[in-house]
Amino acid sequence: MSATSYGWLVLAFPVAGMLVISLGWRWLPGRTAGWIGSAAILGSFIASIGALVEMQDLPAEERHLVDVAWTYAATADFRADVSILIDPLSVFMCLVVSGVSFLIHVYSVAYMGGDRGYARFFAYLNYFVFSMLLLVLAANFVLLIVGWAFVGAASYLLISFWYRRGTATYAGIKAFVMNVIGDVGLVIAAFLLLNETGQLDYLGMFERAPEVFEQNDPTIVWACLLILVGAFAKSAQLPLHTWLPDAMEGPTPVSALIHAATMVTAGVYLIARTFPLFDLAPTAADISAVIGTATLVFAATVALVVTDLKRVIAYSTISQIGYMVLGVSVAAYSAGLFHLMTHAFFKALLFMGAGSVIGAMAGIQNLDRMGGFRRSMPFTFITFTCGALALAAFPLTSGFFSKDEILAYTLNRGSGFVILGIAGYLAAALTAFYAFRMVFRVFYGDAVPEAKELEEGHLAHGEPLNPMTLEPEDTDVGFPGPEHHIAERSWPMKFAMVPLAVLALVAGVVGIPGVTDTIEHFLEPTFEESTYAADHPSESAEWVGLAAGGIISIASIYVAYVFFIRRRGITLELRDRYRRLHDFLEHKWYFDELYDAVFVRPTATVGSFGRRVVETDFVQGFIVGGATGIVRVGTSFARAIQTGYLRAYALLLLLGAAGLLLYFLISAS
Amino acid sequence: MWFEQVMFFIAALGALAGALGVVLLRNPFYSVLSLVAHLIALAVLFLLLQAEFLAAAQVVVYAGAVMVLYLFVVAYIGGADEPLGPEGGALARLGPLFAAAVGIELCIAFAASGLEALDSQGADVGTGFGTPGQIGQLLLTRFLIAFEAASFLLLVAAVGAIVLARRRRGLEEEGPAVGPRDRGPRETAVEPGSPARETEVLNVRV
Amino acid sequence: MDVIWFLVLSAFIFVIGAAGVLTRRNPLVVLLCLELMLNAGNLALVAFSRMHGGEAGQVFALIVMVIAACEVVIGLGIIVAMYRNRLPIDVDEMSELRG
């Protein structure tokens, strides 16, 4: 089978899974829906491997295959097809997406057990994976936008999965609205590009673009900036990042899959895919790099102080995606995508571990209430620590090689980028610190009651509460089920977490500079025409950068150790001393309040003004009331005549007759 | 000549007096009688205009039949003496005013118009003018359709009057299968002299 | 006789009848006044017929008499129905055809 046929198979399996589950859920007992969903994604993964093998058989110049399934529209100026593109970049993304999705599906089989929306969950998950794969396999902007929108819809459905929770539905709406802002940017960008180049197809457009645009032509800069709007909305970068922490309202597997490993990386993929356009608009690429850096610093500072476990990981995601955006903006495409892959591994792992811990806490997510789970949950502890080590870029972990490679490339670009690089190293220090803040707070220290119970063998079973508002809830449909699952007791969860832990530790081996560089070579056919293709940092520079990163990481972990284990009360003292700074950070730099004041309140005011004045007073009162009032006044004379009295009618008759007579008299004289 | 003029004035005065009596007398019975007098005066006027047949018809049909019918109904219904003076408010006070206005207009039309023919005595007519023979011939030749239509109208009116004035019985007394005409006139369980019986008699007449 | 006298008389009778229709409250009397107006019309018709020498006016007057009779019959039927249904015999009370 050819590579493109494998490509279609990659898309077909999740669709089939979704259809089977959504149509046949009544007849699927117990956890069958979950296994069907997982099998569908496994099929996708195997098909991706098939595509990889087939593609690698071809010589390097031919490794971009386009297959058209159906031509949607073909006119003289415009052509839109349903077509997929098999090239190293898309195959890379397919492998990462389908591989990690498969493991998360298996994890969810156990994690979501007992939830009344079990089949619905897996249908939504399969739909999401299909949309994401469609997005990365698309060969033109039209299909990309279709996949983009589908992914947004899937995200909404999954964030508000426990739909009876008010907080969850608000979070879903917030995510969707911000995603739509990005969608608008992307669509306008596509229009601009179509207008100038006459193409929507990637390969055709990338060939045409250098002929049509000059360097930093305003149109191409605007188009790239609009693409960035789309990318930043999807990848939760400043200023469109506020939806991601709230999206933690969804179940933990959703957070792991969508908001760590796959959907939020769509923006990074988009920037990498449209790299020829960014080559022509260095201004846009620079803006992207600056925003990426700003985001990664911002998110790292906030992750230092938030107390909800999942939100720490969420801010960590925002920060790490900032690294990826920085990477692809400085033309370190393979480095950025390498970090995308390793991040998918360790972030999904961290979320899975967090899910296990939250299960042990019977739904409570507050870090302040956790502690001492080391003895009762050894498996979770070990896997979580593996993820944290990779996140902190501890030497020789996967995160070490990927993140520091990005920073090495950044510094290599010189001039202003040095500042960005230094900011990156600073944030790396913060990253290591907060990663181990989590580890030490959750697993070390005195055991909380739930941990003690677990040591004795009882899984804690508290009252079902909303983790954010702590209101009591139901366990009916639309709420989490009554069961809690921890990794120690479910083999599917273990089955999913072990490969990720291993990969988090050793996946760096494919990116050792100078030694393997596998990713770079693999992705070369896609990116070889980049302007900066030859702009490598030298090997020695890379090793120096790696060493610096390693030292920073170890030092930060040690500082975290001191703060949280040796001198335990120090964080509280610091908080009291720097109360204002702490509050500023804890309120996420007041972004939510800012948006509320600038966008939400005025819109609500306009809306209520519209309802009160325009609708009620003006339209109902003036226009409608006025029209009927005029009719009423105009006919009041006619109505007054209809008295019902016979004599009045007779009088009117007589008057009429008199009038007629008068007329005849006058006209005759 | 002078005889005609004298007769004219007497008949005119009688007609006007009758008309005023209809309008001004309070008791409806007296109004009816006043109209009868008016009609007879009008019959005299018709004779003066050499419309013999019409004068006879007026007396026999109009004053004789229609007014008797009126009398029956007034006797049946009664009607108290109305108080003098209109009580319908401004509307009723305006009525005579506008009527007077119409009257003035008509007079102006007659007097001030240049109708020369109105000064004359009228056309020369033969001896057969206004006789039943002449009228009958016209009715059956030139005005046949009007004649037939009028007779048809009479039929319709008769049927209509019967339908209007029949006694409607409530359905709950007898059940749905029974119509209101099931009881023949003999089985109507009413005492003689009651209004129902008189009306039945009236219906037959009409 | 001048025909105009008859016409003037007819006009007066018509006006008196109109005033009566507008003024009286008993529907029987209203119908009577209506008869007055019709008779006034009859008089005018006959006068004009005498004036022109044709008998068409007299024939018309005859037809008018027929119509007046029909109208009286129906009107009286309505009044009798009103009486039967115990409604007040007063034109001002019968005001349900209001707008």
Image: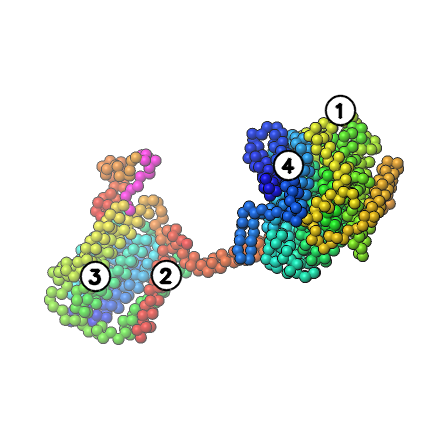
Q: Which residues are magenta?
A: B164-176
**Which element is circle 2 on?**
helix
Residue A365 sits in which quadrant? top right
Q: Closer to the N terminus: mark 2 or mark 1?
A: 1
- How far apart marks 4 and 3 lie (CA) works out to 109 Å
**Gap in angstroms between the C-alphas marked 2 and 3:** 27 Å
Q: Chain of mark 3?
A: C
Location of mark 1 (residue): A457
Q: Given the image, on which type of amino acid does mark 2 rest?
A: Leu
Of tags 2 and 1, the one toward the viewer is 1
Badge 2 crowding class, 10 Å Cα cut-off, few under 14, some 14 to 19, many 20 or more, is: some
Residue type pointed to by label 3: Phe
Counting every numbered tag in the picture gives 4
Disc 4 to disc 1, C-alpha distance = 39 Å
User: Where B31 falls versus A658 (above or below)?
Assistant: above
Which residue is label 2 attached to?
Answer: A652
Residue A146, percent from left and from top: 60, 47
Are the two marked residues, 3 and 1, in contact with CB atoms closer than 8 angstroms? no
What residue is pinned by disc 4? Answer: A46
